[in-house]
Image: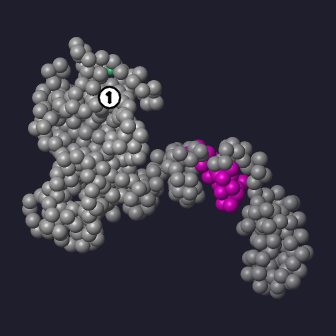
Amino acid sequence: MTVTELVSYEDALAAYDPVMGLEVHVELGTKTKMFCGCSTALGAEPNTQTCPTCLGLPGSLPVVNATGVESAIKIGLALNCEIAEWCRFARKNYFYPDMPKNFQTSQYDEPIAYNGYLDVDVDGEVFRVEIERAHMEEDTGKSTHVGGATGRIHGAQHSLLDYNRAGIPLIEIVTKPIVGAGEKAPEVAKAYVTELRELIKSLGVSEARMEMGQMRCDVNLSLRPQGADKFGTRSETKNVNSLRSVERAVRFEIQRHAAVLGDGGTIIQETRHFHEEDGSTTSGRVKEEAEDYRYFPEPDLVPVAPSRAWVEELRGGLPELPRVRRNRLREEWGLSRHEMQSVLNAGAIDLITATIDEGAPADQARKWWMGELARRANEDGVELAALPITPAQVARVCALVKEGSLNDKLARQTIEGVLAGEGGPDEVVTKRGLKVVSDEGALGTAVDEAIAANAAIADKIRGGKVAAAGALVGAVMKATRGQADAARVRELILEKLGVEG
Ligand SMILES: [Zn+2]
C-alpha cells in the first residue's frame, strides 16, 4: 500500500471543486424482516432469527412487509419526493457469504421514491441537497473475521456468520451530485446526515442510531479542476458510522484526491475503508459497475402499487418536520440561529422541550442542559440523553430555585447528587441538607455573629462605605455553608448597621 502525501485542504480547494454523493442506509424499526416474519430484535444469539425465506432455501417465498413499504413512503414524502405509482423489487446478484441467497432483494430502476430534496442549515445559511431516490432493500448478514489484527478478512484465521440481520428492512437514500458546496463540503455532508437522522427519528420509522449501525453513510467524492464542467472519477468510502466521521472522510478524500491528481496520477474508482483512529481512508476493492450485479426484476414478489389515497393519507399524517419545528422553537425560546445550532449539535432539543413541558421556563431549561449537564456529558464522554437525570428532575430543580429553596450553587450541588444516583432532587436536598437558610431568625443570628467578629469592617460600613458589605456577606455565606440567599443577607447587614442600601 502506498501512502499518498496529502495536499493541504486550502491548496486542494484552490485548485479543485469537490462533488459529493451521499448514500445513506437506514435500518427500519419494523418488528419483523422485510420479506419474512422473523424477528428483528437486537441482541439475540447468532442465527436464531432466521427462516427458509431469509436463508434463501429452495421453495421458500418472500412476502413484502407492509409497514416497511409504509415507512419507505413516509421517508419519501418527508424528503419531498414523488412516490411511484407502481414499482418492483429487483435482484442484485452477488456471491458473498453475508447473503445466503446469493442475491439481495433491492430496487433498481424503479425506486419507490425519487426526485426530492432536503434543506440543511450550514453556518446560518440554507443549503439544498437534492435527492435522487429512496429505495427499499434488505440488510445483509454480519461476518466476523477472527484471528487477524484488524478484524478484516485479510490475515483472519476463520470467519463467523450471523444471519439474524439478513433481511432486516433497509431504506437507501441517494443524493444527486452535491455541487457548489466548495470549501464547506465536509460541513454540508455532516449537516445533511444530521438533518436526515433527525428526520428519520421524527417519523418514528427508525431510531437511526449510527453507533449501532442503524444508519450508515457511504461517501462518494470526486474533484474537478476549478471551472471545469465534467465530474472527476469518484471514490466511495463505505459504512462511515458517525456524523463526525462523515465530515472527516470528506475532508480526507478531498486532500487525497488533490494529491493524486496534482502528481499527474489518476483516481481509481474503488471503495475505501474509513479509519476512526486517524481519519484516513484506505483502498478496499475496485468498484463493481451496476451491470456486474446482473439486476433483474424479482419474480417472486408482486409489484408495489401504493394507491394515491393511501399516499395522501400518509402525507397528511406526517409530523412537524425537524427543521420546521426547530425554527418554531428557536422563535419561542428567543435564540439566535447560532445558539439553536449549538442546541441541535448537543442533542438537547428534545430534552429542553421535555423540561419545559414539565413546567420549567425555557431559559432555565436551556441553561441547565447546555451548561452544567452538557459539561458533565462531555467529561464523561456520553450523549446528553444518556446522563442519569430526567427532564422532570431538571424541571424540579428549576422549580426549587424559583420558589427560593435553592440558589444557583445549591442547585448545581443538587444536580450533582441526582447524577451520582442519590435520588431525585427533593431527596438529594434533604439528604445533603441543601435548602437555602430562609429562617429569618437563624439568618439574623449569623449576621449578628459576622458583625461582631468583623467590628472594623462594620464600622466602615456604618461610616458610609457600603461596598465593604461584601466581606460580611461572604462571612455569613461561609458560616451557612453557602445556603443563604446572598441578596437577603446583604439587606439584613445594612438594616442592622442602619445604612441605606
Ligand atoms: Zn426469515
Q: Is residue 392 magenta?
A: yes
Q: Indicate whether 166 appears above or below 128.
A: above
Judge from the rendering whether residue 51 lies leftward or rightward of residue 387; answer left or right: left
> Mark 1 belongs to which amino acid?
Ala
Residue 228 at x, y percent in the picture: 9, 65
Residues in magenta, as a range? 391-417
Main SS class of the magenta portion in the image:
helix
Instruction: Confirm if mark 1 falls within 8 A of ligand 1.
Output: yes
Element class at badge 1: loop
- Estimate how packed mark 1 is, as few (under 14), some (14 to 19) or many (20 or more) residues with alpha carbons within 10 Å: many
Residue shown at the point (16%, 42%) measured from the top left: 288
Kindly tell me whether residue 293 is visible in this rendering: yes
Judge from the rendering whether residue 53 lies leftward or rightward of residue 180; answer left or right: right
Query: Which residue was labeled with disc 1?
Result: 166
Judge from the rendering whether residue 472 lies leftward or rightward of residue 124; answer left or right: right
Residue 339 at x, y percent in the picture: 43, 61
